[in-house]
Structures are given as structure tokens and as C-alpha cells.
Image (tube, coloured by chain):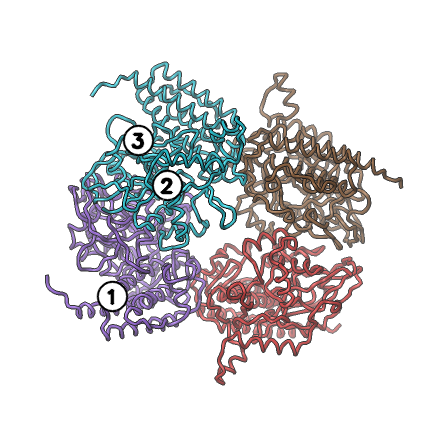
Chain colours: A cyan, B brown, C red, D purple
Amino acid sequence: MPQVNAETVADDLLGRFRAIRSLTEALAAPLSPEDQTVQSMPDVSPTKWHRGHTTWFFETFVLPVDRPDYHPYHPWFGYLFNSYYEAVGARHPRPQRGLISRPGVGEVADYRQHVDKAVEELFATGPSERALSLLELGNHHEQQHQELLLMDIKHVLWCNPMLPAYRRPPDRIDAASSGVAGHAGDAGAPAADQAARTAPRATSHAGDGWIEHPGGLIEIGHEGLGFAFDNEMPRHSVQLVPFCLSERLVTCGEWLAFMEDGGYERPELWLSDGWTLACQQQWRAPLYWVREGDDGPWKIFTLLGPKPVAAEEPVCHVSYYEADAFARWSGCRLPTEQEWEAVASSRPNDLRHAHLLEESVLHPRGSSSLFGDVWQWTASSYSPYPGFRQAKGAVGEYNGKFMVNQYVLRGGSCVTPPGHVRVTYRNFFPASARWAFSGLRLARDA
Amino acid sequence: MPQVNAETVADDLLGRFRAIRSLTEALAAPLSPEDQTVQSMPDVSPTKWHRGHTTWFFETFVLPVDRPDYHPYHPWFGYLFNSYYEAVGARHPRPQRGLISRPGVGEVADYRQHVDKAVEELFATGPSERALSLLELGNHHEQQHQELLLMDIKHVLWCNPMLPAYRRPPDRIDAASSGVAGHAGDAGAPAADQAARTAPRATSHAGDGWIEHPGGLIEIGHEGLGFAFDNEMPRHSVQLVPFCLSERLVTCGEWLAFMEDGGYERPELWLSDGWTLACQQQWRAPLYWVREGDDGPWKIFTLLGPKPVAAEEPVCHVSYYEADAFARWSGCRLPTEQEWEAVASSRPNDLRHAHLLEESVLHPRGSSSLFGDVWQWTASSYSPYPGFRQAKGAVGEYNGKFMVNQYVLRGGSCVTPPGHVRVTYRNFFPASARWAFSGLRLARDA
Amino acid sequence: MPQVNAETVADDLLGRFRAIRSLTEALAAPLSPEDQTVQSMPDVSPTKWHRGHTTWFFETFVLPVDRPDYHPYHPWFGYLFNSYYEAVGARHPRPQRGLISRPGVGEVADYRQHVDKAVEELFATGPSERALSLLELGNHHEQQHQELLLMDIKHVLWCNPMLPAYRRPPDRIDAASSGVAGHAGDAGAPAADQAARTAPRATSHAGDGWIEHPGGLIEIGHEGLGFAFDNEMPRHSVQLVPFCLSERLVTCGEWLAFMEDGGYERPELWLSDGWTLACQQQWRAPLYWVREGDDGPWKIFTLLGPKPVAAEEPVCHVSYYEADAFARWSGCRLPTEQEWEAVASSRPNDLRHAHLLEESVLHPRGSSSLFGDVWQWTASSYSPYPGFRQAKGAVGEYNGKFMVNQYVLRGGSCVTPPGHVRVTYRNFFPASARWAFSGLRLARDA
Amino acid sequence: MPQVNAETVADDLLGRFRAIRSLTEALAAPLSPEDQTVQSMPDVSPTKWHRGHTTWFFETFVLPVDRPDYHPYHPWFGYLFNSYYEAVGARHPRPQRGLISRPGVGEVADYRQHVDKAVEELFATGPSERALSLLELGNHHEQQHQELLLMDIKHVLWCNPMLPAYRRPPDRIDAASSGVAGHAGDAGAPAADQAARTAPRATSHAGDGWIEHPGGLIEIGHEGLGFAFDNEMPRHSVQLVPFCLSERLVTCGEWLAFMEDGGYERPELWLSDGWTLACQQQWRAPLYWVREGDDGPWKIFTLLGPKPVAAEEPVCHVSYYEADAFARWSGCRLPTEQEWEAVASSRPNDLRHAHLLEESVLHPRGSSSLFGDVWQWTASSYSPYPGFRQAKGAVGEYNGKFMVNQYVLRGGSCVTPPGHVRVTYRNFFPASARWAFSGLRLARDA
């Protein structure tokens, strides 16, 4: 194995740092100061908070490593932009992030520039290995918040009865300039149809489309040189029974069939907690599905505005409860994360073809890759791997302390930054969460 | 009595319309788009909502009167900016006003200009009497929202742990330019001291400062030509027993004495509902009072930033429950609104000397006027006067439907626009409300 | 005026003490230990708690007056049976009274006997004037709890889907013994019809049935020798405008007309708070009205079991909000308490003919008396009379501290013990309360 | 393998049916009708509900199998006593079970006798295999409710500030008869000391007391003839890394050390959700621990009344969050359920020596058995085994639909009926639950 040159590593990290920091600003660019201030539910954070928090992460965990005399930019930003790190002190209550109008977006931009400059200086003077390691963590951390930023602003805009778009569809920009105006939703359908044509996928599970796996003792988890979060380690053996994994994601068309067959009205299909929640919140369709009256055609609110439901698109914004109920209805089940990884590790090239974050799309289209489009709920609760050790100090709060009452999702989504997801990557949300770009892929016993 | 010329009336109204619309914009001017978006509790509305709602009021109730073909500016603004008028259709849920980032402040400004222009055109073409009457209501309505705008943004900024000021103290602006920097609070005290010196007031109730009233059958309520809200009518007789009303407002110094005497710890001083609430919310002082630790000196958060408590200033931001408990502690009671009006109608000149909205002050100073500085809680529940009739149609929802579970306040405050308050004016809030500029004036049986 | 002999007073009080204490036990007698344990909402108290609390009142406020060495029966009963008297120490949280299975009904009965015996001994040895005065208060207090006991157990039984009766209708007892079984509700209608026939009353407001009052300066409130609560004093003058008061209570038939005319669907009829509550709780009819499906005939759950709605019966179990909405719908209004008392004091004989607590009825029937059948909501908030002074010490907490956010009801109901209500008697409940036997009588301006 | 005679099976089942039904009644016998009516929180059910529900289970699932014409005993009991079986119709809301005073305990006893008789008749006429199978399920179901009955009544009595005992300690009965009275708590300690002496156990983890397991591919889950719930199947292979399991349960003495070391104040020891809950509910010690003031000695409320904490007793009534925090504090971890079963299946004789339900004890004492005294939290979320199939029909709702957001506990407790627990038995509760008799046994990597 060739030696990895330390300088190359640092250069590479710096390049990625710059690109990631720029992407965050690009993602916020279409949003007004008003947009960036709103918090629509406790799970959601304002855009300007994401921009501040990711900056605070570098300021708090990276900059002091080689500069113990580093002085924070602002006496209150540590309090305001700490998310959940108990070890670094008190913090603003999460449900009240949307009450903080100041610092405004301009001041947050200044803060970002200040910290960017300090990081650049750090690189110029030759950072320590510890600093580099935390800088890499900071990069991956900011990528996670890029996805959260898009998830969160989608929910914010959804709370507005006018259903405004995060940004206009890119083709609409051209169309507009050539005088072809129209309602966002009207034009969305043809675009989706085209996507369907150019990305041939199975449209039915009847008799087709299963990847078979013989089971047995397999290895899962991360090992080796590349970056991974602590929750992906250590690599270890698990025993699997033979199983099949679907070659494709569950589609909106299949979901419509589930709905028409009483999927949201039949308790026998649901986990008890899920049924209670579905009744309380009157779920009738995935999040972001709307229709006029009780009989109008369903539309889907996307980051580019509302559009008609396209049958062949992967279903998105369903909770674990809904995914589980659908799987039961279909006579299948959700895969475990071990099953998913067992298949994925045998198809590493899939990742290259995944539909991940593209600023002009921001909505699942479907593909033949095991990765991308939507995060895939697994049947696995989010638990430590055997021998799991969390990092010392505050960054140890990153993953381990959330290992309860959550379920693992695999594969990445259409708002996951490219280069972020991996075969061993474990995303996680509570079973009730719907605002992530979450869908499902079926499994069954062989 | 001289004839009132219709044209003069219209000119006068137009002048006031322009002045009032301008003042609203001036009040919003120090606030960023982020500031104007936040709603810190269901009672509070975002600044940009106030700007939109007052505009919607003219658009909805005034413009169509003489122009039945008037077409609303935007299809969704009726839904978004209706406050509580059931008769004009569905509306956005009040607690979710802070989730609406669009229209942004720029679009709201455009909306204001559009409606202003339409109103100017209405005046140019000679408005009907009905239109004029509703335009006058619209003026007074917008003045109410000017006070609400200031009350609300004070609460919004208070939720920020940095306690930012709405605007800098005006003297500080001069001071800053001459290089005399310093903490906002430091300079506040001398200014207040000076105010105390130039406005000599009693500092104790022992033996002094009571206005005596012989009671008997007196008339209260509005009658005649000038504008008044429907809730001030009809004028009618009430029988009063002899009583005394204090010449001055209760001060912060007196409130500190109440606190030191266990005012917030002794249930026997409190109404039962008030005691329950005070315990639940852990009240220890008026709203906006803060101190470091359990023993630091108390400061007060004002629209110009935090400042030390000044003993001679009128106490402000107390609930009806606190006002009532204080009155009981002091061996006195709150006046009824009839008592208050009986005295006020004998001192109409007082109103001219009242401390009302001055953009450079925005905080009570105290005066010898019966009016101004702080709204004064009365012992009277907000009820219809005998023979009360509410207006027909949607504007009839203005006052009558709130006549339950609220208490009347009288006199106006340091954020009430000049020209808005009257001898017969009835403000009202629930007994639990503290974010209004509310204080008290004692009464006792003669 | 003849001298009142002190011994006669004591004898009279003792007689009433015995009768009242017995009645409480008689009211509890139809209830099982299980029935007596349940608390169906925070406002409700378990039957055995009422039995214990009224006993604790005598033990705490009466017995120690002449016997400073009196030792409480049980170390925990002071904590468990104190309702809201802050001055006598901590107490069990009200919403958790239904979690206390011990003391059981047997132990509560022992406690009652113990205190009864001690009171008898007090009388035997010649009680002080202070003791007699508090004993009289204790008698009236227990009468209030007799009504509460019946209100509360009605709500408890209502929460049971089987809608069990507190006791069987008395005629049904005879019927049963003679073999004429049947569904409680079937037989209720004829009985009600008969009551309607034997108590002729106006059945329409069209052109009839108004008591006119000329208004002017009148006196209200209690004065003189008989017992009254502190909240009925002092007697004082009020100025009234001429008005009319209906000769009869609003009936179920009229209420059905209100419902059919969209009474529960038209916000313009409602106070804003009331409309919000009615929507939240999905009110469609008075409390205790039920029907099968959306179209079945309405039945009313009574203490004797469910029965069909009888058009001529006074409507009962409506909130202030509903009463106010009905009055607005009918083009009338609620009377003020001053208006009610002005009329009532001119018809003192009415009280003798009132339908008050009769153990075999327990449901309003209607009569020509101003009193009885149902408590009548007035438009008056519950406020102190001019010059009101509350008693010193813990018993001073009896009334005054509740004088906020409540509305006055007058006249007594079919579950008010005879001898308890008076012309000057002021009952009070929050505007939202429906479990009291509350109805209404209309008023209008003359 | 010898043939199992069908008649023997039936006889055996009948014997167990009788014994189990009797035990339920014996467990309820010390409780008054008032005790049996109370529901202290939504998780808790009233004693008389448990008695009714277990009866309804036989009536609903067993009796109709061979007697399709079986007519339910009461038209409302199906509604009132259905717990969560959606497939058999609507049911009374769980949080409102404590509002139902009727049927009373007497009527519930009649219901039990009626169904017992019908089951006896079923046996007399030769039940079908399906009926026998469901009868066996009914037996095990009732055993589960016996434990719940005791868990629940303990919580009910705990809500009473007098902390009454479910029953008197058996030795106290003797003592009382010989005149040796005293406070329950005083005498508890010597008894516990004695238990400690007669059951020698390790008192420290330093260097001792670990059971080593080499890991590897092992089999877990139920297979074969005996009864097991569906969630224990199918038997399957899992791969384990080498680990150690403690020979004994964590004790109160160790828990006191955890508390003294800031266990309840140090967020770094806790899962994030757990820390939030511990702060909200102000956890300072396990449930049922009390002390006077902030410094008094801790006592534990038991079903026999309060007693001093005994250092050597197993800690009980801790949530998953607390167990996990303790394990982290001690440098160890919780075992997975697979690890636990791997050890347990190698020590099947342990079960015979377990401390399970003994009516005179009802509190953990500690033993050298892997089973008994307290349920042991495992690190495993409650999930289906590979290939899990739930039963068809309503009884299929027994286990599968709860497989989300719960954690598995193993081993049985001092209130688990003997004969109920097994090596493969999986109990489960949410991570927040504390009212079960739940403790922990540590594990660590080898």
C-alpha cells in the first residue's frame, strides 16, 4: 500500500473545506433573510442557524487545537450556535432557535468569513494531525447540515399556504426567458416523464427485480484509511439468513395503490405506536402530498414548487411507521441494515451512479443504483456495533448519545452532498420522522 | 356650534391617514427583515404582519365601499393578513404567523404603497360618508397596531439572550459621535433622575396625593361628534360611592418594597388564579426585570436596551394579578373604570401633558397627568355598557366579541400614539397579560 | 324587633347541622365505594372526598375555637381534605384527588362520626359566639358541597359508556316491584309530560311573558340578621336603565331551534373565546345531550339515567358562552345580576315555589318561580361589591380570592339544597363551565 | 421421545387454568373496592380492570372456538375490557380506565365466575386443539397480568402521600399478634439483612464475579414442544464476540455510589433522550426511593410498605436510560439479549433457584441465579427475530405490533408468577418505563 503524503492530505482537506463552505453559502443564496430566520417546528433549524452552527463547530473544535489562545469571535455565539454538546457549556433551547433575529444573515456571513480566514491561516502554518482530523470531521459535519438545511427549509416553505418554491426549476428559468411561462406544477410532469423514460426501472414487483443473497457470516462496518463516523465502527461479523432485496425503491405509484387499498385506514397493517400517531395527526398520504378537496389529484410539494405525483418516482417523506406498514401490506418487509450493507458492499460501483444532491433537481427520480434518491428505512434500530467506542471529549457526543429510539436509514438521498455517503454510512431518525428525504426498498426472506 | 365642513373633514382625515401610515413605517425602520419576521409567542405578531394587516384593513373594509370592483392586490393576502374577522373568511392560524417568511418586508412595503395609492385616489374622487367613516376607523385601528408593534417587538428582542435594543438611545447617538461610549444602562439612570427632578411627584402615599371624589350619580361613556370605538358607548349613568384616586402611578421603588416584603411569595395577597399562574411561571418581579444571580441589582429591559431600575419611575409590565396583589398589600384597591373616568372627565387638560409615544423615549417616566406613561389596570371586567350595540357586518367584530375574561385599562402609555387615547377610551387585556405597557394607580374608599 | 334568644339560635343551628350532615350521607348512600372514588376531571371531586372535606371544615375551623387542645383525628387528613386554604398549610393537588383510594368510604364514615360527635359535645357545653358563627358557615359550606357532590357524580357516571344512573327513578322502583320493567328513557317522557301539564308555563316568547322593570336607583346586596356569604355584602345602590326580564327559563325546545338554526356553527353569534372553545371541544349541543349517529333523536343523560329531550323543560348544562350565544341569536341578552336581583327582591315569595333539591327528581322541570330548576347565567363578572371586606384568617379565602374570570349565576337549581339559596345569593363559575346545573333566563332593554 | 397424551395435556391445562385464575383473585384480595378502581397514570390499569380483561380474553378468544353460539356475558364488557385488539372492535380509551366505577368489584367477580364455569364446561366436553392452544395462551396472558396487577397497584399506592402498603409484611402479622408493634420500615432492615446473609452474593465487581463467554455462532430462540410466545421464535443463529456477563445484579449499594458520584447530574453519562427526560422529571434516584429533606436517609417504598435502602439488594425500578447511564459510569455496558440468552441457556438450572413471585416477599432480595428478583434491561431493541411470523387473527396483535421503540428485558422478577418465565422469554418496555420491577446486570467485552 502506497504511503499517503501528509501534505497531500492537508491540501486535499483544504480543497474540500473550501468547496463545502462555498456550497453551504450557495444553498442559502436563494433564501431571503426572512426565509433564513424561520423555524417551523422544533426539529427544524433556521438556515442562518445552520450557517452559524457549522462555523461554530470549526471555531470550537478545530481552531483551539493548535492555537490555545484562540479567542471566540463573539461572546454569545457559543451559546447561540451550540447544538447539543453538553461538554462545551449551556446553549440556547432548540425549540427557540426561530426566535433569534440577531445576529442577522449579514452578521452570520461575517462570522463565516472570519472563521474561514482563521482556518486558512491554520493550513498556512501547518496544522497538527489532531487539527486535521477534526477539520475532516468538521467538513463531514457541515455536509450533514447541508442536507438538513434543505430538509428544513422545505418544511418552512411548506408551512406557508402559498407553497412557495425554494428556487425555480432550472428549465423554467430558460423557459421563462424564452417566454414560455406557466404554473410550476404543470411543467413538472413532462420533466418527470422524461426522467422516467431515460432511467428505465422496473415498475412492478411481480416476478422481477430481486437481488438474492445467500446469507451466512458476513462482515459489516468500516475499516481502513478513509473517513468514517465512529458509529460505523468497528467492522464485525454478523450471521444472516438467506434473503432478497428489491432492485429498486418503492414508487409513488405503488404508494397510491397502498392508499387506495386502505393503507392509512387499516390498523392491522401498522405498528401500534404508528397507528396511534397516524390517527392523531390524521395521516392520509406521505408528507408534502396535497390535493384540493377529497377527490382532487394528488400533488407533491417539492423544493422547486408543487408538481403532480409521478407514478414511477420513488416515494419520499414517509416515516418508519408508514414504510413498515407498506412493507407488511405488500407481503414483504424492510431489510435490516446488515442485509442492506451486505448487498451494497457487493455493488460498490452503484454509488457512482447514485442520484445525490444536484441543485437543479432536489427531488427523487429513481435509478438502478442501490444508493441515492431517498434514504431507505431499515428494520434496524440505531444501536452501537459490538465494541463501539465513542471519541473522548465533546466530539464524542456526536453519535453515541443518540443510540436509542431511532432507526437506521441507508443509501443517501437527492439532497445528500456527493462524496458524503458510503457503503457503511448509517443515517438515523426517530420512527415518526417524515421531513427527511426518506423512502424504502423492500426485502423478503429467500 | 359651527358647521363642520365635509371637505375639511376629508382633508383632515387624509392628513391623518398619511401621518399614521408614515409613522408605522418609521416605527418599523430600525428593524431588520429578520427582526420583522419573528413571532415570540401566540399573542405577539411579527412586525411585517402588523404592516400587512393594517393595510389589509383599509383594502378590505374601505376600498370596496366606493369601488365594488376593487380587486385585491394579492390572492393570498386576505388569508394571511386577516386577524380575526370570521365574516370575511378563513385566515392563517394566529400562532403560526411567525412561520411565514413570504411575503418578505419588501413585498409588504410594495403592498402598503399600492393600498396607499388607492386610498389617495379615493380621496381625490370624493369618498362617500361610509367610506370616510371606515377610513377613520382604519386610522385608529392602525394606531392600535403601532402600539402593538412596539409591545411585540420588545417581547421578540427580549427572547434573545443578548437583549438587543430596538434602537439606540438618542442621546447615545450624540454621545457616540463625540466619543463618549459606554453601556446603555449606565447612562439611563441619570436621564431618569433628571426626569424625576423636572417632574416633581409624590414618592409616598402616606398622607398625601389622593384625589377625592364624592361619588353619586355620574355619567360615563362617549357621546357627540368626535371619534370613539363602539365599546365606549352609549353614555350612561352609574352610581358611585365616595372614593379617592391616587394622584400618581405606582413606582418601581414601591414595587421593590412589595417584592422585599414577600409580595411574590405570600398567597394571601393574591387572587387564586393569579397565585397559580405566578407559581407556574415562577414570577419574581415584573416582566422584563432581570438580574444576575439571586442577589444582583435589578435591571429593566427597555426598547432602548437594559437599564438599572429607577425607583421613581412608574412600574410597568405587570399583570392584573400582580396589580391586584400589590393593591391589596398596600391596603388599597384598584379603581373601577367608572371611578377612573369620573376623575378623568374632571381633568381633561391632563391629557395634553401625558407622556405618550415619543420615539426617543419608549419607556415610562412618570408625570402628574392622569394619562400616559403606562396603561392603568382597573378592577372592571371588560363588559358592554348598558344599551351597547355592535356595528353591523365584519367591523362589528372589532370589540364586542372580546367582552369576556378581560379587564379594562385606562389612560394610555408611553407607546400609545398621540391623538389616540381619550377620557372614555377602554383598552383591555386578559388578567394574565404582561407584555402590554401596563401599570397601576391606586384607589381607596373615601 | 324581638330579641333572638341565644339558646334558640344554637338549638336551631344544631338541628340544621344534624339535618345537613344526614343529607350528605343520604346523597352518598346510592353510590358504591368504586363510584365514590372516581374523579373524572380536575373540576370534579370524588364523593368520598366531599364527605371528608366538609368534615375537615368543621374539624379545622369550628372545633379548635373553643377547644384549643383539639387534636385532629388523623395526621394526614388535613393534607388530604384541605381544598384551597393556603393559610392552613399544604394540600394534596386537586387533579389527583381521584388517585387516593385510602381512606376508603368506611374510614371516611368513621371520620364523619368522630367529628359529628365532637360537634355535638361542643353544643352540649355551650359554644362561643365565634364557634356558632363558624358552625353556621360550615353548614352552608356543606350544603354547597351537597350540590357539588351531585354535579360531580353526574359527570363521573357520564364518563361511563353504559351511562349508569345515580339512582333509579322513584316511580320505576314501584314499577319494578309490580313487574313493569323497561328502558329508563322510555318512561321518562311521560313523566316529563305530566310535569309539564301540572306546571303551566309560557312556551313562547312571542309577545308574552316579560317582567318589566323601570330601572333607576335600586339597592342590592345583603343586609340584616340572616346568614349570607361575605360576597353578598355590603348592600349598596346601583343605577339601572329600564329593562325586561323573561318570566321563564329558556327551554330545550328553544334550544333545539337554536341548534337547527346553526347555533353551534355560526361564529357571529359567539364571543371569540367561546367560539374557539366550542370548536376545540366540538360542542354540538349542551353537555349530557347524546344521540345515536348524526340524525337520531337527542336524549339527555340525567342522574336517573338517559331520557328523551322534553321540549318544555328548561335547558341545562350550558356554558356562559352558549347562554350568551343563544341570547344574541334570540335578539335578547343575558340580564345583569343587578337586574336579576332587582326583580327577585320584588318577588320574594317566588323562592317558596322554587324547584330545588328533591332526591326523587334531580332534573329541571320548569316553574313560574324566578328561582330554582337551573342556575341562571348573568352577564355580570364575579366582582367585589363596593366596600367588600373579606373575613380575617383562613375562612377569608372562602370567596374573595375567586373574584376574577368568573361569571355570576343566580337563583338555585334542582340540586341546590332547600334553605340554601337567597335573593342576594351569588353563585359563580368560569364561562367555560358546563357541569353545573346552569341554564338561562333572557333579558332585554325596555 | 414419548408420546404426549392429549387428555393429559388438557388435564394439565385445566389444573393450571384453575390455579392461575385463583391466584389472580388471591392477589386482588387484599385490595378494597376503592383500591381496585384507581388508575394512577395511563400505563397503569385498575385492579378490577385486570380481573375483567383477563376474563374477557378467555371469553373472546377461547369460548367461541368450540361454541360459535357463545353469547357474551354483558353487552358492554367487550368494549370496556378489550385492551388493544383492533380486530375485535372499538374499546374504551386506555387513559380513562380509572373513570369507570361500574362494573364494580362484585360484578367483576360474577363475570369471572361465569366465564370460569364456561371454561370448565368446555373442558368437560372435550375441547378442540385450537381451543386448547388458545386456552394455554390465555393462561400465560393472565400470568402477565398478575405481574402487571402488582406493578400497577404499587404505583397507585405510591401516589397516596400516606404510602400505604398493599399488604402487611407476613412476619409483622405474627409480630403484631405477639404485641411487637412498630413502624413497618424499622423492621424491614433486619429482615433484609437476614436475606443477605442466607443468600451469599458478590458485593463488588473488582476482580470477581464475571461469567466468561467465548462468543461465536450460537443459537437463540424457542423451538420444540413447550409453550412460548410468538416473539421467541424462530430459533436462529447469531454471531457473538467474546464477552463477560456479571454473576450478579447491580445492587442498591452500587446505585448509591453512582448517585454520590453525580450519576444523575452528569450528562456525559446519559443517552440524550434519557438526559432530557431525567431533567424534565427531576430524577434523583430510582422510582419509589424517598427521603425526608435533601439529606435524610433513603427509603424504598415496597408493596409491604416503606423500608430503608439495603445496600446488598438488587436495585429495582430503574429505566433503560438509568441502567444505561449506570453501565457507562461503571465502565461496562448492558448485555444484548443474545448474550444474556447465550449464558442463560448454559445454566438452565438457574431458573429453579430464581426468586419469583412469593406473596409474602414481593421485593427483590438477590440471588446467585441468572433469573428472578428483577427484570434485566438488555441493550437490544425489541425487534422481530429473522423469519418471525405473527399469528393470524386478533391474537396476532399480541406481540408483533409492539416491536418498535421498546427494549428487551430478560430473566423475570419477584412479581413474575412461577412457571411463567423461560430462557427464551422476552419482556419489553419503553426506555422511559420505571414502574416495572426492572434492574440490570452488567456486561463487558472480554
For label 1, the residue is: D130
Specify the quadrant that holds the C terminus of chain C.
Answer: bottom right
For label 2, the residue is: A439
SS under mark 3: helix
For label 3, the residue is: A351
Q: Is mark 2 in CB contact (under 8 Å) with mark 1?
A: no
Residue B103 location (% of width, % of height):
58, 34
Q: Amino acid at mark 3?
A: Leu
Left or right: where D313 falls relative to C79 = left
Q: Is mark 2 in CB contact (under 8 Å) with mark 3?
A: no
In the rendered image, is residue D179 in sight?
no
SS under mark 2: strand
Specify the quadrant that holds the N terminus of chain C.
Answer: bottom right
Q: Amino acid at mark 1?
A: Arg
Badge 2 and badge 3 both on one subunit: yes
* Rendered view: B443 above or below B160: below
Q: Amino acid at mark 2?
A: Gly
Chain identity of mark 1 = D
Q: Which residue: 25% across, 49% down?
A: D385
Q: Residues within 10 Å of mark 3 (few under 14, many from 20)?
A: many
